[in-house]
Image (cartoon, rainbow, N blue to C red):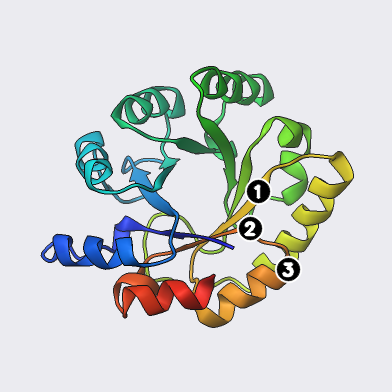
Amino acid sequence: MIVAPSVLSLDYSDTKKQLDELKKSKATWLHFDVMDGHFVKNLSFGPHVLTTLKKDLDLFIDVHIMVDNPWLFQQIFIEAGADGITFHLEACKDDDDCFKLIKEIKKKGKKVGLSIKPNTKVSSVKKFIKDLDLVLIMSVEPGFGGQSFIEESIDKIKELKKLIEQSGSSALIEVDGGINEETGLRCKNAGADVLVAGSYIFNNDIVKAVETLC
């Protein structure tokens, strides 16, 4: 299981200590949420924060852009050091726009993912699945940390797992929202490959919290 701690919940008054603990953990990815205040009603980090964190961490930088203009933001954050970009299906103008953006990110040598909100059906990603490196299922409404896990997400993971297997895709299933030891295990058993956790990791013993999700 890949564990991707979300820096949205990092205690920035104690950054060095928390990052040192993160280095000791089994986490191999770092999840970086980008919010523009329009696609979701919150603002988060600019590219300079990513660049600063990347200097001190040897982790895969997993960037999730929750923005109205994914074309603009993918470029900005790839230049800042992102290893993978995941954008929202709901932010695309149409299917052609989505395919073109997938191709653009891949052309730059980065991993590409597609994210869907809780009310978006899994079947909506079927046409793109063979071109993706991952699909991110939001198990809370995107925009804020600390929300409760949406139970229907388990069925969505199972449905997506079948879709990936039937299509012959190698896409990973990533889950973000309300992840803790209990919900993480349920997601893992349903077929998830990557677990994103913020509050659960950074509000507890970081090394132990990551260990419970692996």
Foreground mark, 2 or 3, reads 2
Residue 79 x/y as whole percent: 32, 24
Q: Is 43 rendered above or below residue 139?
A: above
SS of the residue at dot 3? helix
SS of the residue at dot 1? strand
Residue at the spot of label 1: 172
Q: Is 135 rendered above or below residue 139?
A: above
Residue 206 x/y as whole percent: 33, 73
In which quadrant of the rendered image does the C terminus lie?
bottom right
Would you say 207 lies left or right of 125 here?
Answer: left
Which of disc 2 and disc 1 is earlier in sequence? Answer: 1
Would you say 72 lies left or right of 162 here?
Answer: left
Give the amino acid at mark 3: Ala
SS of the residue at dot 2? loop
Quadrant of res 76: top left
Contact? badges 1 and 2 (CB < 8 Å): yes
Which of disc 3 and disc 1 is earlier in sequence? Answer: 1
Q: Looking at the image, which residue is at 37% across and 48% down?
A: 33
Residue 129 x/y as whole percent: 74, 37
Residue at the spot of label 3: 190
Residue at the spot of label 2: 193
- Regarding residue 56, the answer to whether it shows in the image is yes
Would you say 93 lies left or right of 144 here?
Answer: right
Q: Looking at the image, which residue is at 25% across and 35% down?
A: 47
Would you say 166 lies left or right of 119 here?
Answer: right
